[in-house]
Image: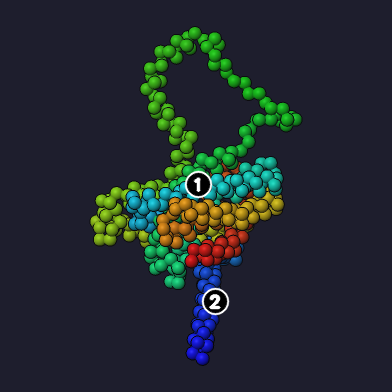
Amino acid sequence: MGRFLLSSLKEAAVVAAATTAAAAGGQSLLGSIKIAVLPVAKVFTLCFLGFLMASKYVDIFPANGRKLLNGLVFTLLLPCLIFSQLGQAITLHKMLQWWFIPVNVFLGAVSGSIIGYVVVTLVKPPYPYFKFSIIQIAIGNIGNVPLVLIAALCRDTSNPFGDTETCSTQGTAYISFGQWVGAIILYTYVFHMLAPPPEGTFDNEDGNVPLKIPQKDGSPENVPLLEQEASSMDSNNSNKGKMKSFLLFVYEKLKLKQILQPPIIASILAMVIGAVPVLKKIIFTRDAPLYFFTDSCIILGKAMIPCILLALGGNLVDGPGPGSSRIGVRTLVAIIIGRLILVPPAGLGIVTLADKLGFLPADDKMFRFVLLLQHSMPTSVLSGAVANLRGYGKEAAASLFWVHIFAVFSMAGWIILYLNILF
């Protein structure tokens, strides 16, 4: 009798434990959905308010105002946020620990380009938009949108990454640490890929005969004697300017003027100051002599999130424009599916493999979450700016419009999956 009673108690305990685990699992799933959906809902709400203010019914947020606000965010508010958050979190030791963040950005561009090439090859868009479509799939937004999502996620006290301040500081620092690689990719690889076809390559009459552009023959026998003597006399002067010419050549080829944008300069300054203990103690430590500057950047940085979302929502009021008809519905659908559905699984594979190989800091869930977010974002807004410089402005506007609309739903789904994997 005693054995039977003991066996019954054991069975009851097992059933109770299983029931409790199932209930906890259900609550965990509901909690993950809540944590994933609420940040996206906050982003959508602020964007909708910007859209409403820019609409013809309210009309207090015109195009000129949105342009000025975009400029203010890009040149002041975003650099202040990056400088204050990254500078407080970074050290030389952490820079060595975080080495995989810029590598992840690079690998994301490579894997996205491969997926984009395969998708675009199957879809066969109109000829001028082949490379354009690859870029729209390959290059994600690794800066603004992740920063907004992390800020919205960390504001919720029930977030799984700890207290609000630690969550926000770490997340912002991780995201900011990889932005300089994204800028280099944008203004080198993307800039080259979106180069327009050279003018005058084909004859205007039949469109098939290449035009022969006469070139000067620089062979010695065709150079006048006086010109040869003058060139030999000036050889010494030319040697003195070789270094200057080389530096100018590097400056032009690497597009340093475009790469060194305010957010990138802020990231570099924060890393340099944060890596030097004396400078970090003077500038980023509370009660330090120059902490007032950091505190001012913190105040300005807090305004970045609402301002950029209002501007993004206001920019959507113009709709996709005529660019949609130029690209075609089939190509737009391919870009949306490629960027939002096919690229994130490849990123998940990259991050999982890096974790298995021991490349990631141990037990740092936020680090892994940021790496996964870098592969799950919509197309980069800055890639649209580069496309505008290269003559694809209307097409880029249409692509960005539709990708960001559908990204509201895809981001929530991927965040739910990532939280369930991490926790």
Q: Nearer the viewer, residue 95 or 329?
A: 95
Q: Are marks 2 and 1 in contact (CB under 8 Å)?
A: no
Q: CA distance from mark 2 to mark 1?
A: 41 Å
The image shows a total of numbered marks equal to: 2
**Residue in the image at 51% along x and 65% along y:** 419
Q: How would you rate the neighbour count of disc 1 (Cα within 10 Å): few for under 14, some for 14-19, many for 20 or more? A: some
Q: Which mark is residue 57?
A: none
Q: Is residue 82 visible?
A: yes
Q: Position of residue 358 (x, y in %)?
A: 44, 53
**Up/down of 181 relative to 333, above or below:** above
**Residue in the image at 65% along x and 43% along y:** 130
| SS state under label 1 | helix
**Up/down of 105 relative to 36, above or below:** above
* Amino acid residing under circle 1: Phe
Q: Is residue 45 visible?
A: no
Residue tagged by mark 1? Answer: 106
Earlier residue among tags 2 and 1 = 2
Q: Residue furthest right?
A: 206
Horizontal arrangement in the rendering, residue 139 relative to residue 71 (left or right)? right
Q: Position of residue 372 (x, y in %)?
A: 51, 57
Q: Position of residue 210 (x, y in %)?
A: 69, 27
**Up/down of 250 relative to 21, above or below:** above
**Residue in the image at 38% along x and 55% along y:** 86
Q: How would you rate the neighbour count of disc 2 (Cα within 10 Å): few for under 14, some for 14-19, many for 20 or more? A: few
* Amino acid residing under circle 2: Ala
Horizontal arrangement in the rendering, residue 206 relative to residue 143 (left or right)? right
Q: Which mark is residue 22?
A: 2
Q: Nearer the viewer, residue 38 or 211?
A: 38
Mark 2 or 1: in front is 2
**Residue in the image at 52% along x and 47% along y:** 107
Looking at the picture, the colour scheme in use is rainbow
| SS state under label 2 | helix
